Amino acid sequence: MKKLLLISNSTNPGEAYLGWPLPFIQEFIDKYKLKTLAFIPFAGVTISWDDYFKRVQDVFAAMGVEVLAVHRAEDPIQMVQQADAVAVGGGNTFHLVYWLHQLGLMEVIRREAEAGKPYMGWSAGSNVACPSLKTTNDMPITEPASFNCMGLIPFQINPHYLDAHPSGHGGETREQRIEEFLVANPEMYVAGLREATLLELEDGKLHLKGRSALRLFKHAQAPQELVPGSDLNFLLK
């Protein structure tokens, strides 16, 4: 069975990097006895992949996990296949998807995760667990071979979901943008994953964890507010 930890955001203001989800990550590591983690830094654009790797390495080293640098590997596919788990960092989703397709990793990671290898991602790393990148918040700074992603879950996530309509902002709200997506994709659910929240899939069951409710969208239906502890398993059908 798939083992997924899909995190909305890595950092809250005034907190350390991966600070707020650290207890959930530690629980995930302990649960599956993870010793090695293949890290995918390709969403990083304004940070070098080496610096991104170092930032993640520092966090996981304190938990006794060896982080493997996929971007340095002679054979990235083999590194992913041999690691205990895969982690995909946040940043620009288009940039991430471009490189995952370019290196042949999108399908490899999908197969590994479908076979039961633990997968965790934050922000863009959560987006690519969805069927497509179409509910990302990011600018298309590069053109990937396809918008198709791993499809590890059958619904879409919008990370960093915001309810607010800032004063003076004349453009669409996040909710309006999601409604546009649903007009074009009426069969799909979209989970608005607020900051400091995550989804965990284990033993075939989907759990919402963290500090806030999830805002769930479906075409021609009123949005729902689902609090941690709600039954989310209908989203897996």
Image: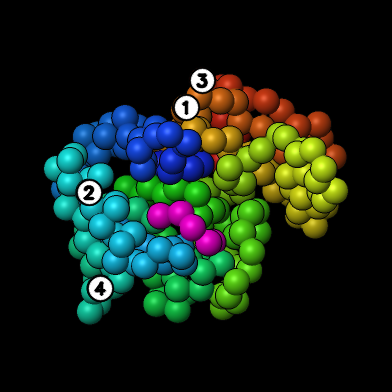
7 sits left or right of 24 in the view: right
Q: Residue at x 17, y 41 (%)?
A: 62
Cα distance, mark 3 to mark 4? 40 Å
Q: Considering only vertical position in the picture, is 157 above or below 226?
A: below
Dot 4 amino acid type? Arg
Q: Are marks 1 and 4 in contact (CB under 8 Å)?
A: no
> Residue 174 location, x and y as percent?
73, 44
Give the secondary structure at mark 3.
loop
Task: For label 4, count other residues whose C-alpha is less than 10 Å away and answer few (under 14), some (14-19) or many (20+).
Answer: few
Tag 2, which secondary structure? helix
The verdict on residue 91 being magenta is yes
Q: Are marks 3 and 1 in contact (CB under 8 Å)?
A: no
Q: Which residues are magenta?
A: 89-93
Disc 2 crowd, CA 10 A, few/some/many (<14, 14-19, 20+): some
Magenta stretch secondary structure, dominant: loop
Three-letter residue code for mark 3: Gly
- Residue 168 is tagged as none
Image quadrant where residue 74 sits: bottom left
Taking 136 as reference, is 1 left or right?
Answer: left
> Mark 2 highlights which residue?
58
